[in-house]
Image (cartoon, grey):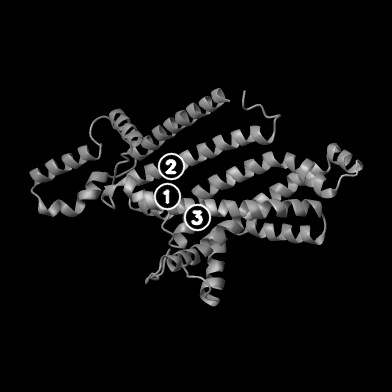
Amino acid sequence: MLKYLARRVVFIFASLLVISIVLFAIFQFMPGDPVLRMMGDRMGDMSPEEWEIEVEAVRQLMGLDGPIVWQYIRWIINMASGDWGISIVQRRPVLEAIRVPIAWSVVLNVSATIIVFFITVPLGILCAVKRGKLFDNGTLVFTMLGFSMPNFLVAVLLIVIFAVTLQWFPIAGMISPIPPDTSWLRFVDRLRHMALPLITITFVGLAGVTRQVRAAMCDALTEDYVRTARSKGLKEKVVVFSHAFRNVLIPLVTTMTGSLITMFSGNLVIETLFVWSGMGRVMIDSIFRADYAVVMAMSVFYALVALIAIFIMDIVYGLVDPRVKVMR
């Protein structure tokens, strides 16, 4: 097991290294000079000589001087040591600029993943057990809506219904303009602002996972070992959960891992639409304002989340199914 874990860790670092090289090369060839964008508003206050000296000093500070290979080596070493560069828009270290947005994105997406898991697993199992009946057909229609509707359209509909018409939740933001006095009321206020983006992400995620669980469970219920268990007189709950469900775990783990990765990388529009100060909003703002240091740092973070999720998925495979020999 230790050898396997060591190989996977080496694979993660090697993949991150390749991804970082590709990202660095892409952003190096993007048009424009980040130093000139950062100092553009100060040009009129200096003489040409002072301007050149200042530009060169800032270029050295940002690690943009010297050959491209040396720039990359310096950048990757600084990343490993916790120095992720300077945001030219916020004019502070990148790590300080993205620490809070990453935390809020983790809260939102992990909460949505947990809710999706606890809803879709029993829902998919129940649909498979009641295959072809009214409950199953109604759930398939409901999940089809989740497939056919883009997430931004779901968000707009929820805003119109629950924020504008019913006024149950705020339209956008993370806290009221005048925050409540006590910490408990501020927590409740946060939850109210979090409700609509959380419902949107959960609704979109329900469709795929529910149908995957249902399909895998339908296949498992037709296997010979299930018919044998039933012929022995075992209760239907025992047959479903002790025999059939074990074979659903691997496709379920795969689907949930993919959903988690998709949530982190695909909810940029949702966070922007609901003015949720997470990675999505900061990422889009940084792209439009050419803040490449922030974009590169967040891109590396997205890649790291995906690699860690796949690493955990491989380990869980071996735990839920002994036939998967990942621990050799």
Of residue 169 and residue 231, the one placed in the foreground of this image is: 231
Q: Which residue is mark 3?
A: 108
Q: Which residue is mark 1?
A: 102
Q: Which image quadrant: the C terminus?
A: top right
- Residue at the spot of label 2: 301
Left or right of 154, for residue 103: left
Is the N terminus in the top left, top right, bottom left or bottom right quadrant? Answer: top right
The earlier-in-sequence mark between 3 and 2 is 3
Which quarter of the figure has residue 185?
bottom left
Label number found at residue 75: none
Q: Secondary structure at mark 3?
A: helix
* Closer to viewer: mark 3 or mark 2: 3
Residue type pointed to by label 1: Ile
Distance in Å between CA atoms under marks 2 and 1: 9 Å
Q: Using a 10 Å C-alpha cutoff, classify the residue at mark 1 as few (fewer than 14 neighbours), some (14 to 19) or many (20 or more).
A: many
SS state under label 2: helix
Q: Secondary structure at mark 1?
A: helix
Of tags 2 and 1, the one toward the viewer is 1
Query: What is the three-letter code of the residue carrying label 3?
Result: Leu
Residue 39, image x, y percentages: 20, 49
